[in-house]
Amino acid sequence: MYTEGAASSGTVAMNYGAVDSAGGSLVKYAGAINVALSDLDTALSPVRETWYRSGAQSGMDAQAAESKLRGLLAEMTQIVHNLGGLLSQSAADGAALDGHLASKFQQHGATPAGQGLY
C-alpha cells in the first residue's frame, strides 16, 4: 500500500555503478563455477577410468549422480550469468533514462534538484 511520505513514497533510487558492479560480479562468479566444474572433471578422470567402467552398480550410480549434478550446476551457472547480465543492463538502462529525463528538464528551463525545483 502506498503511504504518502513513507520511505518508498513513489521514488526509486538506484546506484547505477553498484548495480552494474553486482551484475559483473555475478557473471564473473558464473565463470568461476565453470572453471571449478572443469577442475572437477579433471580430478574425476581417474575415477571414471576405474570405478565407473568397472561395471559395478555403485560405479553406474555414481556416474548417473555426477551426470545429474553436472546438468543442474550448468543450469544454475546459466541462471547466475543471466541474472548478472540483466542487472548490468538494468543499470545501463536506468542511467540512460535518468540522463534522458534530466535533459528534458534542462530543455524546459528546470534546474537541478539541489536548487529545489524538483
Image (tube, rainbow, N blue to C red):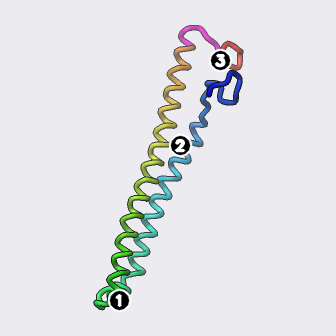
Q: Is residue 5 above or below residue 83?
A: above
Expressed as whole percent of the image width and height from the top left, the position of residue 61 reads 35, 81
Nearest the camera: 69 or 113? 69
Nearest the camera: 98 or 107? 98
Q: Considering only order in the chain, which callout, 1 or 3, is on the residue closer to the N terminus? A: 1
Residue range of the region highlighted in magenta in the rendering: 106-112
Q: Are marks 3 and 1 in contact (CB under 8 Å)?
A: no
| Local secondary structure at mark 3 | loop
Expressed as whole percent of the image width and height from the top left, the position of residue 6 reads 70, 27
| Local secondary structure at mark 2 | helix
Q: Extreme front residue here? A: 1
CA distance for labels 2 and 3: 25 Å
Amino acid at the residue labelled 2: Asp
Direction from residue 9 to residue 37 in the image, left or right: left
At x 39%, y 62%, the residue is 74
For the stretch drawn in magenta, what is the main secondary structure? loop
Q: Is residue 110 above or below residue 87?
A: above
Amino acid at the residue labelled 1: Trp
Expressed as whole percent of the image width and height from the top left, the position of residue 13 reads 62, 31
Indicate which disc residue 112 carries: 3
Residue holding disc 1: 51
Residue holding disc 2: 20
User: Dividing the image into 4 quarters, which one contains the C terminus?
Assistant: top right
Direction from residue 1 to residue 28 in the image, left or right: left
Quarter of image, res 31: bottom left
Camera-nearest label, 3 or 1: 1
At x 61%, y 24%, the residue is 10
CA distance for labels 2 and 1: 45 Å
Whether 3 is among the magenta residues is no
How busy is the neighbourhood of tag 2: few (under 14 within 10 Å), some, or many (20 plus)?
many
How busy is the neighbourhood of tag 3: few (under 14 within 10 Å), some, or many (20 plus)?
few
Amino acid at the residue labelled 3: Pro
